[in-house]
Amino acid sequence: MNYNNSKQISAVIFAGGNSLRMGQDKALMCGGVERIRQLCQECGIGNIVTLCGDKERISMFEGKVWPDPEYCEKLSDVIRWVHRKIAGPIQYIPCDAFDLDRESLQTLLQCGGGVPLDSDSNRQPLLANCPADYQLSEGDSVNSLFANLASINITKGADNFSNYNDKSQLKDRHQQ
């Protein structure tokens, strides 16, 4: 299913992690969540939700911000909760998608569902595009939830689908 009207899609931005390996809050780095929200708006997404983790983080972000339910113990629990709460297609985006740009996001929105591959051909499930009728797969890992979504090989801009877990990755990437 192609979405010609991106207002049908909800964007869900993951911004609740502790960023321990990075040493600072990834949700505030490289333009942070606000940059991703702006990209979503530029692409015409009508419903943008930031998942902030603990309720104490709500005030850190603009727009629609949801804390994780207390019963959720891991990210896969949060994704299952969001998937039940939001009707229609969902574009997930991690706050550390520092290289995501408007063109790459638009390509994801128009793919009709799937998980993009980064430039190393690794699936990036936190950038999953879920059609309205997608049923999350069984399992406790994020990868397992999106196992039944096809991999999307977008050769132009695949670098834009990387995410960063520690400072050395960010330094290596942005010094090339």
Image: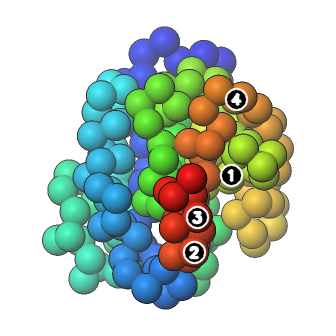
- The three-letter code of the residue at mark 4 reads Ile
Task: Please report contact status of discs 3 and 2: CB closer than 8 Å, yes or no.
Answer: yes
In terms of secondary structure, where does tag 3 sit? helix
Identify the residue position indicated by label 4 in the image. 154
Residue holding disc 2: 168
Q: CA distance from mark 3 to mark 2?
A: 6 Å
Tag 1 residue = 124
Residue at image position (47%, 26%) is 103
Task: Report if the CB atoms under discs 2 and 1 are less than 8 Å apart.
Answer: no
Nearer to us of marks 2 and 1 is 2
Q: Is residue 68 above or below residue 90?
A: below
Vertical relation: 6 (above or below) 19: above
Which of labels 4 and 2 is toward the front?
A: 2
The one nearer the camera, 58 or 60, is 60
> In this rendering, would 69 be left or right of 134?
left
Marks 1 and 4 sit apart, C-alpha to C-alpha, by 12 Å
Q: In the rendered structure, which disc, 1 or 4, sits on the residue that comes first in sequence?
A: 1
Residue type, mark 3 in image? Asp
